[in-house]
Amino acid sequence: MATGINSPIGTLPVEMLHRIFDNLDAETILLSIRVVSRLFQAAASTYNRYSIDFQLISTSKFPLLCRLINPENVISLTLLNNYRTFNQTDLFISLTHLKQFTRLHSLTLDINESQLNFV
């Protein structure tokens, strides 16, 4: 992994990268940008304004994103049950605890009663 220091973007302060991240989805930040350099990895790890909408995250990448996301850095979370997110809500509930999302400002749920009991 390169350090990114030799490129102009590698000289940007982390705060500026975070402002750029404000316009990107969590999947792009964690699976595409984070792996570019140590600077981007550190910026993604310290970014604390993730908005996560699980209907926008591919099913194949979902488990990896659940492991990479620090719940304390999430401000918005959307959990839906539909044909695109089949079983993602159950998997998410089994991998995380909602109590860990201490900075959560927005929570959107479209789940069944049994899932609500686990949340």
Image (tube, rainbow, N blue to C red):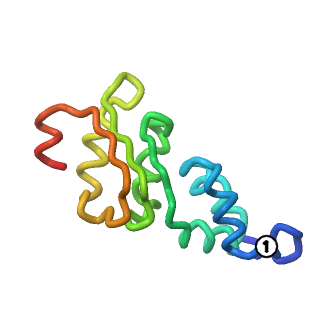
Question: Where does the N terminus fall, quadrant-wise?
Answer: bottom right
Residue 70, by quadrant, is bottom left
Figure quadrant of residue 33: bottom right
| Amino acid type for the residue under numbered disc 1 | Leu
Give the residue at mark 1: 12
Question: In the picture, residue 88 is in which quadrant?
Answer: top left
- What residue appears at the point 41 percent right and 59 percent down from the top-left corner? 67
The image shows residue 101 at horizontal and vertical percentages of 32, 62
Residue 116, image x and y in percent?
16, 41
Q: Position of residue 119 (x, y in %)?
A: 19, 49
Q: Where is residue 44 in the image (x, y as percent from the top left)?
A: 59, 66
Lateral position of residue 68 relative to residue 27, left or right: left
Q: How crowded is mark 1: few (under 14 residues within 10 Å), some or many (20 or more)?
A: few
On the picture, is 10 further left or further right than 45? right
Residue in view at x 17 percent, y 40 percent: 115
Q: How many marks?
A: 1
Q: Residue at x 68, y 74 (%)?
A: 14
* Residue closest to the far top: 83
Q: In this view, does 1 lie above or below 78?
A: below
Answer with left or right where residue 71 lies relative to residue 35. left
Q: Does 86 appear above or below 70?
A: above
